[in-house]
Amino acid sequence: MKNRVIVIVGQTSTGKSDLAVRVAKKFNGEVLIADSRQIYKGIDLGSGKITREEMREIPHHLLDVADLRKNFSVFKYKKLATRAIENILERGKTPIITGGTGFYVDVITKGMILPNVSPSPRLRRNLAGIPTETLALKLRKIDPERAKTIDLKNRVRLIRAIEIAKHFGRVPKIKTEPQKYEFKKIGLLFPERILKKRIKTRLRNRLRKGMALELHALHERGVPWKRFEELGFDQKYTALYLRGKLTEVELLEKLLQANWRYAKRQMTWFKRDKEIRWFRPHQFPQIFNYIKEKAEIS
């Protein structure tokens, strides 16, 4: 019988982290984070990272495992996540994967064998001067499926996606390997109107607590402005604000727009996975019963 792993997914601001802690408390679990920015040390408010207090003494894995100055590949994420799952299971506990980065979730739960493509300095030089909008069009042409789910304003991810497709001379077909685990997937879903309010409230709280100051301190310690642009929209627009290119009002507006676009991309990704059972975030009894029933965890 396969080892069982619980997976909690959903859009930004749906309460995934809180539910993961509740599930871990009830089912003797530990949490693995599936988030492409929370892996980096130093961007806590900037990535919406769970705090020590919010963890409620539940161990969390794959937070703060990467140096902000260096790129971190999904290939490496899979290696670390697989190791963490094995370690948790060996200790008789339940792994609980949670996060909003759909590709990170899929490489673990679908047994994807990733192409380990080395960076091409020549291709990157050729693409460096091309506008971001043109890169997005290029990706749509060579890999329309990837273009539906990627952040089309993130140059680093666009270039990497193009790089992989160019390496193979086509869009590589993702291969899979037999799964060692049985994944039980839970999705959290809010009505659109409520989710928009939650995103706005969460953003305002992060800004109030010092998201911009956090990024400023990182820059003072030597992280270049360009690196923040590569990390994602939260860091990109906050850096522009710190450089005097956006007002505080414009910053909030840009962040709200970008986070809402991101939430829609997340749902596009997760809705394709028919293994996910969807719940309202407050339906704790129903979620716990589903876990007991489907995963037979007592």
Image: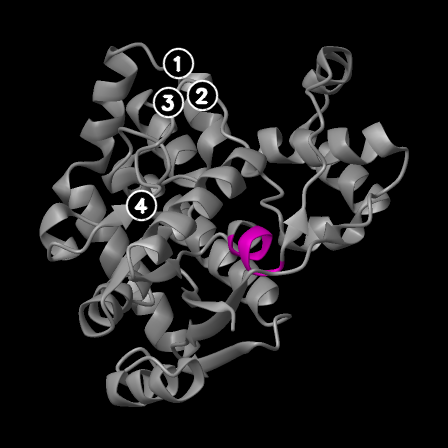
When asked about the image quadrant of residue 148, the answer is bottom right
The crowd level at tag 2 (other Cα within 10 Å; few <14, some 14-19, many 20+) is some
Q: State the predominant SS element of the stretch in magenta.
A: helix
Q: Residue 206: x percent and y percent?
A: 21, 46
User: What is the distance, in whole Å, between disc 1 and disc 3 at their CAs?
Assistant: 13 Å
Q: Earlier in the sequence, mark 1 or mark 4?
A: 4
Instruction: Give, as a three-letter code, the residue at label 2.
Output: Arg
Color style of the picture = one colour
Residue range highlighted in magenta: 105-110
148 inside magenta stretch = no
Instruction: Give, as a three-letter code, the residue at label 4.
Output: His
Instruction: Give, as a three-letter code, the residue at label 3.
Output: Asp
Q: Earlier in the sequence, mark 3 or mark 2?
A: 3
Q: Residue 22: x percent and y percent?
A: 21, 70
Task: Give the labeled residue for mark 2.
Answer: 227
Q: In terms of secondary structure, where does tag 1 sit?
A: loop
